[in-house]
Image: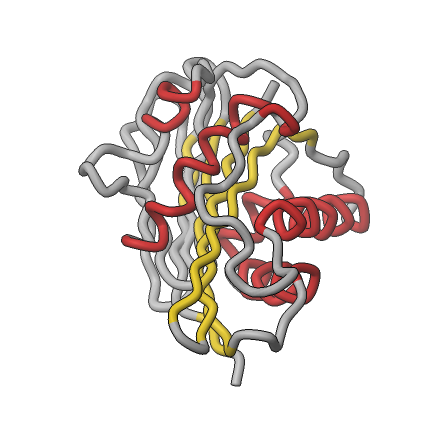
Amino acid sequence: MHSLTQAQDSVPTRPAAPEYSEESLSPEASAALPSELSPAAAPSSEASEAVESPASSSAASASSAPATSAAAAQGELSSEEMELALLRLINREREDNGVFPLGLEDSMQWAARMRAPEVMVSLSHTRTDGTPYYTAFEEAGFVYAGKWHGENVASMYFPAGTCTAEEAAEKMFESLKSSSGHYQNMLSANFAQVGIGIFVQQEGDTVYISSAQVFSSL
């Protein structure tokens, strides 16, 4: 049986306000307004969203970003294929709602792929070293000060051999979509760029997947 875990989410705050976050037993999301404040806390469970707050960015493609540390752990289930599938689903939803599609941004993709394995350890917008998620932007060379930025995190698991990358992406997308905070981040017109990281790990007959999606304005 397929099963999803929990998620976190929060809503945007004002530019000068301190970080803001909301947590819930199912998907969570957090967001903060543009400015140099530190974003909100992180999600937990299979789907979670995070903060919107201004940051600066450089646009590029994800092709040069580092591959997710765990390659497809289950047959043909590729982390990179799942990343692209999730991007397609998010952009299709945005277009269906009259919002322009998100473009993959190179350094944000690095940040998302750094965050994905951390989310496997802790489904939160707080990193395993105790710092907020947006410190991954700094490590990836993405300047976020002065721009809206946010994060969605999610995790899921299912029996090995029962899902393709596309199907796994659809399950994760539906979990994120069911959370108002995560969904708000996915559709926000404040965001124009995204980085999507997927981490895949198999233990015995079970495949575990964690994901971080980081968003930013131009």
The foreground one among 57 and 21 is: 57
- The picture places residue 44, in percent across and down from the top left corner, at 35, 58
- The picture places residue 125, in percent across and down from the top left corner, at 33, 43
Q: Is residue 107 left or right of residue 36?
A: right
For the C terminus, the quadrant is top right
Query: Residue 57 lies in what quarter of the image?
Result: top right
**Residue furthest out toward the bottom:** 1
- The picture places residue 82, in percent across and down from the top left corner, at 63, 52
Q: Residue at x 80, y 42 (%)?
A: 98
The foreground one among 65 and 184 is: 65
Q: Residue at x 70, y 51 (%)?
A: 85
Q: Is residue 156 left or right of residue 90?
A: left
Compared to 107, does 31 lie above or below? below
Compared to 94, does 208 lie above or below? below
- The picture places residue 26, in percent across and down from the top left corner, at 40, 67
**Residue furthest out toward the left:** 130
Compared to 49, does 192 lie above or below? above
Q: Residue at x 28, y 53 (%)?
A: 122
Query: Residue 131 lies in what quarter of the image?
Result: top left
What colour-coding does the image apply? secondary structure
Q: Residue at x 47, y 36 (%)?
A: 112
Number of marks drawn: 0
